[in-house]
Image: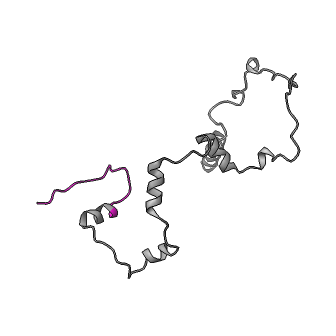
Amino acid sequence: MMRKAAALALVVSAATLLSACGGGGSLFNRDRPDEMAVTRAAPLIVPPDFALTPPSPGAPRPQDSETGKQTLETLFGGPSARSSVETDALNRSGTAAASIRSTVGDPGTQTVAKGQVVRDILAAPEGDGQAASASIPG
């Protein structure tokens, strides 16, 4: 009886181990490429006319210019003249003091209190507003 139980346990464990090797199909049922779908690539050819001009001596190389500058010129067509409104606004604003960032963060800097509504807007969490709620003061 003991010998039959050991043989049965051996057969069950061997079947369990071998079943893990199956991979969902038999040994000869694998995905293969379709022989009829394979095509040859066209051979590389030299174009008949290059139409290249040699660089002029002393001219800057195109790849030496700044990438950011090339991008802006491509997107926006290069620098354009400012409008009169923009020029007037820039002239009226003047120049900022060199220490403006230090002065703004100083606790001694005088500020104007804009009220609770502005504080609430500035303290509002970022997001798309899906979880926003409104309350009407009573």
* Residue occupying the point 64% across, 31% down: 25
x then y, percent, for residue 27: 71, 31
Q: Nearer the viewer, residue 57 or 22?
A: 57
Hey, which quadrant is residue 126 in on the image? bottom left
Q: Nearer the viewer, residue 23 or 115?
A: 115
The quarter of the rendered structure image containing the C terminus is: bottom left
105 in relation to 2, above or below: below
Q: Nearer the viewer, residue 60 or 113?
A: 60
x then y, percent, for residue 20: 63, 42
Q: Nearer the viewer, residue 26 or 136?
A: 136
x then y, percent, for residue 88: 45, 54
Q: Is residue 27 magenta?
A: no
Extreme residue in the top direction: 36
* Residue occupying the point 33% across, 64% down: 123
Colour logic = one colour
Q: Is residue 131 magenta?
A: yes
82 in relation to 19, above or below: below
Extreme residue in the bottom direction: 108
How many labels sit on residues? 0
Hey, which quadrant is residue 111 in on the image? bottom left
- The magenta region covers 122-138
Q: Main secondary structure of the magenta part?
A: loop
x then y, percent, for residue 16: 62, 43
* Residue occupying the point 42% across, 79% down: 106
Viewed as shown, does residue 39 lie left or right of 107?
right
Hey, which quadrant is residue 51 in on the image? top right
